[in-house]
Image: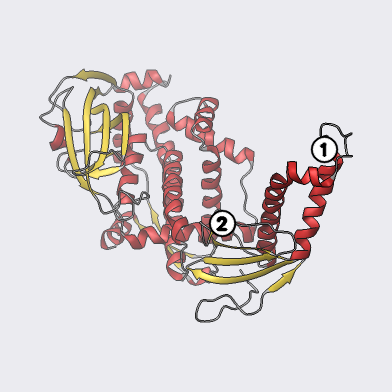
Amino acid sequence: MAQEQTAAPSDGQPADQAEMHDGFTFTVEEAGPARQRLTIAVTADMVDSKIEEAMGSIQTEAALPGFRKGRAPRHLIERRFGEGMKAETRNQLVGDAYRKCLEVHALKPLGDPQPVDPDLEIELTPGKPLEFAVEIEVVPDFTLPDFSTMTIKKPMLEVGDTHIDAELERQCLRHGGGEELEKGFKPADRLLGAATLRVAGEEEALHEAPQILVVLPEKGEAGAVLGLLIDDLNESFSKQSVGSTVTLKTTGPEGHEREDIRDKELQIDFTVQVAERITPCTKQELIDTFSLASEDVLREQIRLALEQQRDEEQSQVLREQAMNQTVEAIDLELPTNFSEVQIARDLERVRMELLQQGMEAEEVETKLAEIREQSADKTRNRVKGFFVLARIAEDTGISVSEQELNGAIATMAMRQGVRPDKLRSELAKQDRLQQMAMTLRDRKAMDHIASQMTHEDISVDAWKATQEQS
């Protein structure tokens, strides 16, 4: 983003000369990473003109006792409406000057402007300039790399009987029946309960949830509770029962979207309210559920679904590699405050991606917890990715139509076994429709990047080996 702005002296003081535009004077100077300080002045002539304009409008419309409409003396009008008129005129001038400054300097703010001196009151005085200074975080400037020089790997997989058997087992478990438990919890058991999160040793809660779902992982594995990974979660519950309160401890990830959680010693108190163990249905029951003719037909349906899932996951792998290489090649300073907001937005984007791929809700939360545990560098790259994708979408005119959004909702609904209209209504209630549209836009932008790179086909085993090395 090119910016023609008055240079600030090295001592950080306002520039000697400022730019004049339509009665406004602007000085723009760097105030930190992707942060600009705007020093704005409205000329005395414009202040007087706007006051006269506002006073004339009031005088024409005002009706005071004893005077006909529009006939009241000016000094009475000023006494009655002067302070309110000045406040309204001041706010209008400040807003107009701020918008004009953004336009003149082609600034793209990422949030609301913050006053340089919060205690300083902006005063409107006839015959005097109106002056104020604010700081804003802006979209950082950067240069996109040459994508054609980059290579990404494409893992190749043939869906076989082993994959079909595993998916058949998963579907039998998914459509199985639940049996309530009182104790003796094991891996894959589902626990509903109330949870409270706080910093260890403190009374005040950071978060309270009246009811959440916890799915116990395999022995020795970490599991997610309130979006945080807890080591050997199964062991913490194996000797508990319904009604028990279990205290879990962990350290807040340095890349967590909430600053009050990062690197803190945390305590989660989880009270088990309901426990359930799923008994898988039989293959015949699954066949009957889908009204299929035989097990062979069921296996063929599963094969087709797995091939579609493979193609989607393959595309996602290409997208992720394309993004990783792109953000690594770009050097830009991230705005501090916006970055905290964007971490949360990026996690929501990942959530929508995983749900669209057909991942179960509890698996999604575990995946998000794993992402929160990633290093600060990876968190930083995810935030950088936001600006890259927005830039790509803007430069190429990428957008998402209502038809594309409805199609994505229909696909997600099919994988979750719900009606599309019901899912759309639920997403609207959760205020996630716009996020879903943004996720689709980002996906198209990533596909655009990946399409310009060289693709190298490798086996799934070779791909897994590269992931383990990284």
**Badge number at residue 329:** none
Residue named by callout 1 = 62
Quadrant location of residue 37?
Answer: bottom right
Q: Secondary structure at mark 1?
A: loop
Q: Is residue 190 visible?
A: yes
Q: Which label's residue is closer to the chain start, 1 or 2?
A: 1
Question: Could you tell me residue 408's position as x and y percent?
Answer: 53, 38
Q: Nearer the viewer, residue 224 or 66?
A: 66
As rendered, which of 21 and 271 lies closer to the eye?
21
Q: Quadrant of the C terminus?
A: bottom left
Residue depicted at x 53% and y 71%:
30
Q: Which circle, 1 or 2, is nearer the viewer?
A: 1
Q: Is residue 265 left or right of residue 168?
A: left
Going 34% across and 40% down the picture, which residue do you hit?
A: 365
Identify the element where label 2 is drawn. loop
Quarter holding residue 98: bottom right
Three-letter amino acid code of the residue under disc 2: Pro
Determine whether 7 is above or below 323 in the image: below
The quadrant the N terminus occupies is: bottom right
Would you name the residue on which mark 2 appears?
A: 113
Look at 39% across and 28% down and name the residue there. Answer: 298
Against 372, residue 458 (above or below) is below
The location of residue 166, given as percent across then percent down, is 29, 36
